[in-house]
Amino acid sequence: MSVIVKKIAQLMSSLIFVYGIYIITHGHLTPGGGFAGGALVAGAFILLILANGSEYVRLKRQEEGSSLIESIAVLSALVLATVGLAAGSLVFFNNWLPGGIPGQLISAGTIPLYNIFIGMEVAAALITIFLALVIYKEEISK
Amino acid sequence: MTVFILCFALFLVGVHGVLTRRNLIKVVISLTIMEFSIFLMLALVGYVSMGEAPVLGSDLVVPQLVVDPLPQAMVLTAIVIALATNAMLLTIAVRLYKKYGTFDIRRINELKG
Amino acid sequence: MEVMLSVIIGSMIVAAIAAIHARDLLSAIIAQGFVGYGLVICFVMLRAPDLAIVQIVVETITLVIMVAVVLDSSRKELETVIDRRQVATTGMSLLFLVLLLFFFNRAIGSLARFGDHTLRMSEAYVTGAAEQTGSINLVTGVLWDFRGYDTLGEATVLFTAAIGVLTIIRLAGKK
């Protein structure tokens, strides 16, 4: 791609990334949440890879990192759900953190934490799938 | 009632594509269309006319008419899962193309090994 | 409202038929994108902003992945030959369509009219969710509190799909 496309993609992808983070963290206040925000974050990275080509980023190491993040995110959501068993009335998925005032950013107990973890999970899974396809294309064209 | 019938017609188009197409990519596209029609059906069933979106203000006042949040929560997860399964189907199609050099299901069936 | 929705869904059906019968796989994918973005407009009209946000992003990523796959391999649609198997599959599809139509005809009688949905089951979700969970977005409250098991299952499916893609597409084993 030409220099103009690369530069615009760099500028745009940072904006899309910040918007995705906003959607994730405000998931319990406004429309959105972990699934939508995670897909947006993945879209920012996919835009960067598409514009800059495969030599810009070292794909193999990125793929390992993204699949590691994916596993960690699923595991922490599971741990957070299991802690509810210990820290409350023996209910899986118990909302054990204090609720706070509804409508503020830090409220709703564990729901924002779940949103953050599922956002990480979705973003990492989509990036992993895309990187796997790109690496496959590099390997067969070699 | 027309919208339900049209939504079902969209599902039937997807079924027809899955059953009659020979190209693997076309089969994936038809499955995607079936998924879309199911999402649309659930969202249509949960709609309340003149209802508001299920997001309250910070004063926690529930409006008179609210759209049902339960089907929306189910569809929300289903959309992302549909993307992941689609990607997996596409990777299987890519590997089959690498091995047999064609997307034709019948040729793949005949060329064993 | 219902008329507008009918027009949009009708154009989605036309685009779906075009996607299934296109001669070029790239135009088939673009027609499928039309169906997906039409779905976004339907979600916005049905007061489901969460779904609209997710669908518009997911549709874009799907299109990118599909175009990458098609451009890597072949984009020509196979020519249709009318032989015994083609006739058999078409007949089977027609039979299946008639069967589905029969059951749909029986089922649609028990559906409420469009827009007359009574919140029988989700009454508690609407009235009590905001106080109980503290989340004023009711969809998120349902997703992560009342139906947390479902969502955890879906996250597991997503994880499994990513692992499956990695397993299928590796050419050589990891050194």
Image (cartoon, rainbow, N blue to C red):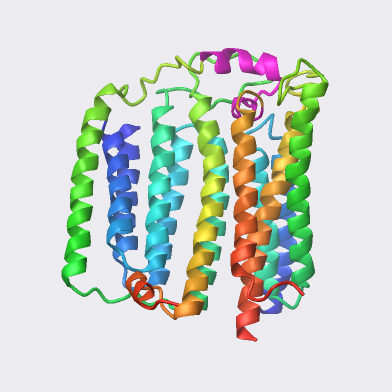
Q: How many numbered dots are placed on residues in this image?
A: 0
User: Can the viewer see residue C16 in this picture?
Assistant: yes
Horizontal side, residue B71 vs residue A127: left or right: left
Question: In the image, is residue C90 part of the stretch drawn in magenta?
Answer: no
* Left-right relation of C118 to C91: right
Q: Nearer the viewer, residue A55 or A14?
A: A55
Which residue is at a point 50% across and 69% down the rendered structure image? Answer: C67
Most extreme residue toward the bottom is A142
The span shown in magenta is C123-144
Q: In x, y percent, where is residue B25? A: 42, 66
Relative to B110, is A125 above or below?
A: above
Between B91 and A45, the residue placed more toward the observer is: B91
Does C137 lie within the magenta span?
A: yes
Relative to B16, say whether B67 is above or below. above
Residue C169 picture location, percent across and down: 60, 69
Which residue is painted at 18% across and 49% down in the image?
C95
Q: Residue at x 78, y 19 (%)?
A: A99
Q: Is A12 or C138 nearer to us in this picture?
A: C138
Rendered residue at 71%/26% (across/down)? A93
Q: Is residue A105 visible?
A: no
User: What quarter of the picture does the N terminus of chain A occupy?
Assistant: bottom right
Quadrant of the image occupied by residue B63:
top right
Q: Magenta-highlighted stretch: main secondary structure?
A: helix
